[in-house]
Image (cartoon, grey):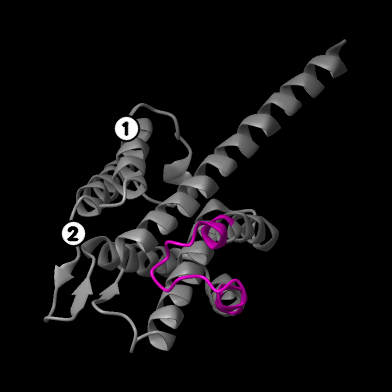
């Protein structure tokens, strides 16, 4: 089992319940209890192994969980934003597929240089595309899901077993999403500090 997925999901749950992210209810337009349930469920699913569908085909339960989350989150986004976001996530996922081939990365998501470039690139692009946390998360999740499906499609004859939501992919997905969440938190923290400092200077 890859370690980033279960540790990262559990850490997020603990930090949220400790009051570190009080704005998430507003950002995701949901309640504290709903967010707690989602984080608790995803944390539990992240400790699972991929489920066997048949002898050669497996599905990770956390992959299904993320698919449901992204569908629900997308339903809350406005029609004016959801379609452009999907188009951008599709184009970004396809672009990173080309980069995956140029870097000759493994199909099993274990090539660290590609993971690093993907981590930095997707987070950077999410900040260019939207200022809203919910849209950044949705764009990023869909981008990585699309990239994962592309890689599975093009390498389907070489992959044995065929895993939808491999542990290495789920690790990458969790790390990128956690990176966006903490960057958003840091951005707000810096902005508040700057505003407080500006207010103090103005009074002087």
Nearest the eye: 203 or 5 = 5
In the image, is residue 49 above or below residue 153? above
Q: Residue at x 31, y 66 (%)?
A: 166
Q: Secondary structure at mark 1?
A: helix
Category of crowding for the residue at label 1, using alpha-carbon neighbours closer than 10 angstroms: few (below 14), some (14–19), many (at least 20): some
Nearest the eye: 75 or 153 = 153
Q: Which residue is mark 2?
A: 49
Asked whether 16 falls inside the magenta stretch, the response is no
Residue 144 badge: none
Q: Dividing the image into 4 quarters, which one contains the C terminus?
A: top right
Instruction: Examine the image and state in which quarter residue 21 appears.
Output: top left
Q: Looking at the image, do the residues carrying marks 2 and 1 touch, with CB atoms under 8 Å apart?
A: no
**Residue 44 coordinates in the image, percent (x, y):** 20, 48
Nearest the eye: 135 or 101 = 101
The Cα–Cα distance between marks 2 and 1, rounded to whole angstroms, is 22 Å
**Residue 138 coordinates in the image, percent (x, y):** 48, 63
In the image, is residue 155 above or below residue 114? below
Q: Which residue is mark 1?
A: 14
- Tell me the magenta residue range: 97-116
In the image, is residue 36 above or below residue 156? above
Q: Residue at x 26, y 68 (%)?
A: 64
């Amino acid at each position: 089992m890859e370690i980033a997925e279960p540790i990262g999901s559990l850490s997020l749950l603990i930090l949220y319940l400790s009051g570190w992210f009080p704005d998430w209810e507003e950002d995701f337009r949901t309640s504290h209890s709903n967010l707690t349930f989602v984080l608790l469920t995803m944390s539990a699913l992240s400790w699972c192994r991929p489920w066997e569908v048949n002898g050669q085909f497996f599905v990770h339960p956390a992959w299904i969980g993320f698919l449901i989350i992204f569908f629900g989150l997308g339903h809350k986004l406005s029609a004016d934003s959801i379609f452009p976001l999907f188009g951008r996530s599709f184009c970004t996922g396809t672009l990173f597929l080309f980069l995956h081939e140029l870097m000759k990365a493994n199909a099993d998501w274990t090539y660290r240089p590609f993971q690093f470039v993907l981590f930095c690139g997707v987070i950077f692009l999410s900040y260019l595309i939207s200022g809203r946390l919910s849209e950044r998360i949705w764009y990023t999740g869909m981008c990585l899901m699309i990239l994962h499906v592309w890689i599975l499609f093009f390498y389907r004859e070489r992959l044995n077993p065929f895993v939808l939501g491999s542990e290495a992919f789920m690790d990458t997905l969790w790390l990128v999403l956690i990176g966006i969440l903490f960057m958003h938190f840091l951005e707000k923290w810096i902005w508040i500090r700057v505003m407080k400092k500006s207010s103090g200077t103005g009074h002087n």
